[in-house]
Image (cartoon, rainbow, N blue to C red):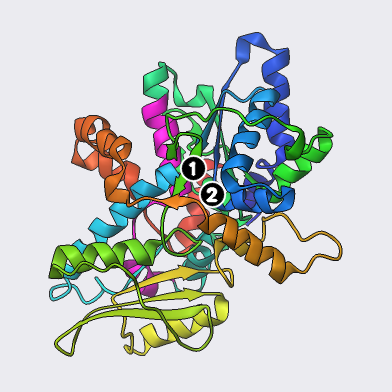
Amino acid sequence: TSAESVLITQQSHEEFFKVLRNNKDNATEQKVVVVSVSPQSRASLAAHFNLSSSEAGRRLTTFFKGLGVHHVFDTSFSRTFSLLESQREFVERLQRKEQDSKALPMLTSACPGWICYAEKTHGEFILPYISTTRSPQQMMGSLVKGYFADQQGLSPHQIYHVAVMPCFDKKLEASRSDFYLDKAETREVDCVITSGEVQKMLEEEHLSLNDLEPAALDKMFSSVCGNEFLSHAGSGSGGYLHHVFTYAAKRLFGEEVKELKYKTLRNKDFQEVTLEKDGVVLLSFASTYGFRNIQNLVQKLKRGKMPYHFVEVMACPSGCLNGGGQVKALPGQNPKELLKKVEELYMAEHSQLPEDDTDVAELYETWLHSLGEEKAKELLHTHYHTVEKMINGLTMKW
Ligand code: SF4
């Protein structure tokens, strides 16, 4: 819609530069600028500059702080919340499947390309299956404009929050009316810029990550061990299948799954994994990437022939590491080789179990519990809409 287009053009690296310039020129109307960087963007920029992902992350911190950014956080940290909530949501859905025919399969919701397609094309039919858990980007929105704002004694509108993502559709996600704070008249994520736009910013500043000194990392909302970032096991799109599967196997069936054995179906972007005991299938999960596979999945669901309990759905073939907003291959560089390099850099980051992150556990304990169940749910989950409701929502905010 035209409202969507206007909201999206408000999210560009030019807009981000404008806010930084305004901060320098206008001392009385300063905003606290926070940037959260996704691990997929880190890997893409690392591949471009021949660095490790952690090294790229530390040099990006130097770059952003040199421009006047106050805090640089890491989206793996907020992804831990998304994974923990997805695990809980899946168990809750599985336990109510006898009373609710639409409790399963649970379809992941972190990909706005897929969500937009589902809402616009399949509407009411598909919405109950989609996980209500917020994506890592919007979890970080709750953390920055909620917890961080409180800690700093700031109102949410005094913070300008920029997310660096591998994806243009994340701009659309940030613009959804569900993520607009009515009272504060501000969005939880003010601006999304892609990995490629960060590369453009470096070029415009005549800088290369290779020439910058690595900075110490902001520890507040970052999953780090010393100067290294920590990530999550599983796919380059967040590892949802991996973590929900291992958690459910242990929690529901007492099975410790050390290694997931994937079976490739029609193509490498359609894989499944099952947990069996005594010839009985206890869990049946799949990952479905790219629109051809997604269409096939939806058709199966419509025909009532869905064999899965859980599906990790992503719009891009090969997932987020191959997102449209990643840094493009150089002239003469093979895009497939580049993707392989990005995947290797991403996978080289040490991973940790979401359940083992003590900083996140402490935030559940101290922050979310103090807010009460209803408010915590609002901050960690979201809603989906048919296209008519979505347009009305955007128009109202506009
Ligand atoms: Fe964005 Fe593609 Fe990842 Fe979906 S799969 S979130 S469209 S990069």
Quadrant in which the N terminus appears: bottom right
Nearer the observer, 102 or 38: 38
Q: Quadrant of residue 312?
A: bottom left
Query: What secondary structure is the stretch in magenta mostly built from?
Result: helix
Nearer the observer, 230 or 116: 230
Q: Amino acid at mark 1?
A: Phe
Instruction: Kindly identify which residue carries mark 2.
Output: 39
Task: Report if residue 93 is visible in the image.
Answer: no
| Residue 133: percent from left, percent from top | 34, 54
Above or below: residue 157 compared with residue 92: above
Name which residue lies at 45% across and 70% down. 313
Q: How many marks?
A: 2
Quadrant in which the C terminus appears: top right
Determine whether the residue tagged by mark 1 lies in a helix, strand or loop. strand
Task: Report if residue 37 is visible in the image.
Answer: yes
Instruction: Kindly identify which residue carries mark 1.
Output: 229
Instruction: Rate crowding at label 2 as few (under 14), some (14 to 19) or many (20 or more) other CA atoms within 10 Å.
Output: many
Determine whether the residue tagged by mark 2 lies in a helix, strand or loop. helix
Name which residue lies at 75% across and 39% down. 210
Above or below: residue 290 compared with residue 373: below
Region in magenta: 123-148
Name which residue lies at 71% across and 68% down. 337
Mark 2 vs ligand 1: CB below 8 Å: no
Instruction: Rate crowding at label 1 as few (under 14), some (14 to 19) or many (20 or more) other CA atoms within 10 Å.
Output: many
Q: In this image, 82 relative to 293: left or right?
A: left
Q: Quadrant of residue 191?
A: top right
Q: In this image, 100 relative to 164: left or right?
A: left
Q: Amino acid at mark 2?
A: Pro
| Gap between marks 1 and 2 measured at Cα | 9 Å
Q: Are marks 1 and 2 in contact (CB under 8 Å)?
A: yes
